[in-house]
Image (spheres, grey):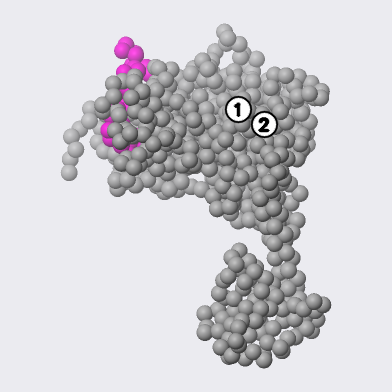
Amino acid sequence: MEYCLASSVLYQPYIPLWNHSSSLVVHGHEVWVPNATLSSPKPLPSAIISSENGYLLGLASTIKKFYLYSYNSTSSASDLSKLVPLANLDWRIKLLVLIGLALSSTYLITSLRSILAVSSTRQHARRVPVAPHWIPFLGHIMSYILSGYGLIENLTVNHYKTTPFGMRFGPIKMYIVTDPKHVQSLFRKTLLGLRADLGLNVAIGPVLGIPKEDQAIYHEDTSGQRLKPWPGSNVPAHRRIRHLHVKASHDFLAGINGLKLGKVYLRVLERNLSADRSIGGKWTDRTDLFKFVSKAVFLAGTESVFGMAILELNPTLHEDYSAFTQHIHTYMKGCPRWAARKAYQARDKMVDTMRRWNQYCEEHGDNTKTGLNDPDWEPVFGGKFPKQRAKMFRESGGMSEAAMASENLGLLFASASNTLPVVFWAVFEVMSRPELAARIRTLVEEAQDPETGELNVAKLCKVPLIQSIFAEVTRQRVVGIIPRTTDRDFEHEGWLYPKGSMIGVPSRPGAMDGNVWNTGTPENPRPLDKFWEERFLVYSDDPSSGPARQNPVSSRATATNKLDVKAKGEARFTLKGVEGAYIPFGGGVSQCPGRHFALTEVINTLGVLLLNFDIDLKIPEGWEPKMDMHFAGLGSLPPQDQTPFRIRRRENIEKDRP
């Protein structure tokens, strides 16, 4: 005899479980047994339903005893009195009964607590509701393993919407905040009990594989990211790993140094694509645009950041990196090595490559040359950022060779994992719109040096339309979770977060919130799940323009594209009104410093492709690849589907032949 738990029926108040003329229905905790011989349905308290060969079995209870009863469409009302005491049943049925009671009771109790927390009328220090769960002690662990980011999206969209809520993972609670107004104010309170630097501890072991004995330097660093250490911290200056890393990022990836690095990227990308003899003046069919773009961007980006040596040491680095990233969720979920050997072999190979590169840099490079008069780039270390990191790790005195190798794997992952999909989506959106591609090509040509032909990247970075394209792509295609940690009891917008709580801010709910964003007009709707290149542009004579949702305007405002009727320079890029909803790179003082370099990579890639190639996407009108939600929660999402295309060089283009 097979018995199955039907605890899921408690999700709804009234669910039929049998399709015969006489049916058994769960209503709350009661089993109703309608029967033609009864004047009215008889309720029996129940927790478990099982079935076999047309029979329905349920658990009924009295004040002191539990019974098992059976009922089918041929049963009469008198059959309901033939109850068998639970004590006389097989031990397997007893076990199922007890498990069912535990699961049902846990869900009922956690549901009641959540409802009471949400409905509380207190104005201050309200307890954040924890989402209901079935499994005692473990909480949402199994749901997260099975659904990943989908669990957060389901709870946000279908249950809590703008209300913060918690999730339990064993002894750990993580609170989710999605309301854009709350998010905006949350990022402003970094110095008032909320810290942005402790989320790194989640990744250093499971994802990067830093040995446990080397993780102490991270856990002991209580000084924070700012120049001034957190109150009470006595961490020596040379062991303030988080602050030193953030400082190096801002020093060498942003501002003028970021633009210099962008020029290196441009030069390498042009060289690599020029050397690709598989592309000529005739159309060449390719199977996947993402594969083409991501490989070109990865090789150029890696060489510009890390130098040429790392690619010479491992010619298959791109393929090895792709294999590593396919298993990111395996590492994050803490799967044991014996259960995921292929995944850990992929990571081991990447760590070994970074170890060999570290050793090569020690033997052939000089990590002290990071001054203003030192070269901005050289073949061994690449840019100044890896040099400064190598110097920082050595001086800390708390990192082994294995830890430094894993750290540099983290840098490679951070520099490529978000950039590759973002560049692809920008290329896809532009190339799938011929008029937009022609407009961007004109802007790129105007930014070329008349003598050398070199692109003026700094000038292109300030073009409102290009800024808007980059912002729209990152709004639509980035699905990340921004971590924060409380170092004391922290009250925010009337909700109390206990000391030591982890707070996660997912980027997607705000990015898709129609109450915040401009979605066009009834005549010209601009839904948030569709790309609109001008979403972040403001026109002085169009009250319907701009990213933020507007009040009703006159019928003359049509939210149409203005590219063909507006003179150059009349549009203005802005984020005003959507600050708490547009957070693809984090928020507050802890925004990703690499976002500036990512923008230059997008612009340079578009520029090189538009100036040197014709790309024709072989797709139906209006089609776009689905996003691969497997990577949801980690940042930008790659496409799930292939995008076939054809390509040819623009120089000496031959006429098409049938």
Residue located 61% across and 31% down the image = 185
CA gap between label 2 and label 1 equals 9 Å
Residue under circle 1? 588
Residue placed farthest to the top in the image?
373
- Residue 653: x and y in percent read 22, 30
Residue under circle 2? 196
In the image, is residue 499 above or below residue 271?
below
Name the foreground residue: 613 vs 427. Answer: 427
Quadrant where the C terminus lies? top left
Crowding at dot 1, Cα within 10 Å, few <14 / some 14-19 / many 20+, comes out as: some
- Residue 657: x and y in percent read 17, 40
- Residue 41: x and y in percent read 61, 81
Q: Amino acid at mark 2?
A: Ala
Residue 436 belongs to the span the image colors magenta: yes
Which residues are drawn in magenta? 426-455
Q: Nearest to the eye among marks 2 and 1: give it.
A: 1
Quadrant where the N terminus lies? bottom right
Residue located 67% across and 28% down the image = 190
